[in-house]
């Protein structure tokens, strides 16, 4: 059975790259471009992994992390943060809010594959 991955990123090119990498790793991909759609899709589909950009419209990635933790059915879903924001400032906040890993943008397809493989096994 394919693993479901929710990609939350407002950049259409980043979504396209993540979609290609995930499909190459036999994942079913769901997409959201803002914080509001993200939480709604997560509640509806209960993905196996969430890949979250922090720089989002309608609330931002940090608020998505906090909102996911508020729902028992979603709080156990691993969240992989991928961001171009300042790592020194944002990585500790993301990890403290429940993210399992932090990847800096731009990430190569090889970096993305290495980061997602443990969650798709």
Image (cartoon, rainbow, N blue to C red):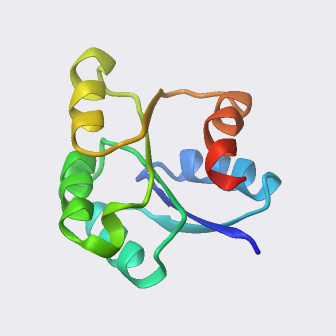
Which of the two residues, 96 or 28, is positioned nearer the viewer here?
A: 96
The image quadrant that residue 117 belongs to is top right
Query: Could you tell whether 23 is left or right of 65 in the image?
Result: right
Task: Give the total number of marks visible in the rendering.
Answer: 0
| Rendered position, 106 above or below 12 | above
Q: Position of residue 10 (x, y in %)?
A: 41, 53
Residue pushed farthest bottom? 44
Q: Position of residue 23 (x, y in %)?
A: 76, 58
Q: Residue at x 51, y 69 (%)?
A: 47
Q: Residue at x 71, y 38 (%)?
A: 113
Residue pushed farthest top? 88
Query: Could you tell whether 59 is left or right of 87 in the image?
Result: left
Q: Residue at x 59, y 28 (%)?
A: 107
The quadrant in which the N terminus is found is bottom right
Which of the two residues, 20 or 6, is positioned nearer the viewer here?
A: 6
Query: Could you tell whether 35 is left or right of 100 in the image?
Result: left
| Rendered position, 106 above or below 54 | above
Q: Position of residue 7 (x, y in %)?
A: 51, 58
The image quadrant that residue 83 belongs to is top left
| Rendered position, 60 above or below 31 | above
């Amino acid at each position: 059975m394919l693993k479901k991955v929710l990609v939350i990123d407002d950049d259409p090119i980043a979504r396209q790259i993540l979609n290609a990498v995930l499909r190459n790793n036999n994942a079913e991909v769901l997409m959201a471009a803002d914080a509001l759609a993200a939480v709604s899709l997560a509640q509806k589909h209960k993905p196996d992994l969430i890949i979250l950009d922090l720089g989002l419209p309608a609330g931002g990635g940090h608020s998505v992390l906090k909102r996911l933790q508020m729902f028992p059915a979603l709080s156990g879903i691993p969240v992989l943060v991928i961001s171009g924001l300042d790592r020194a400032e944002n990585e500790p906040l993301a990890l403290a809010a429940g993210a399992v890993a932090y990847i800096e943008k731009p990430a190569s397809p090889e970096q993305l594959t290495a980061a997602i493989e443990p969650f798709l096994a």
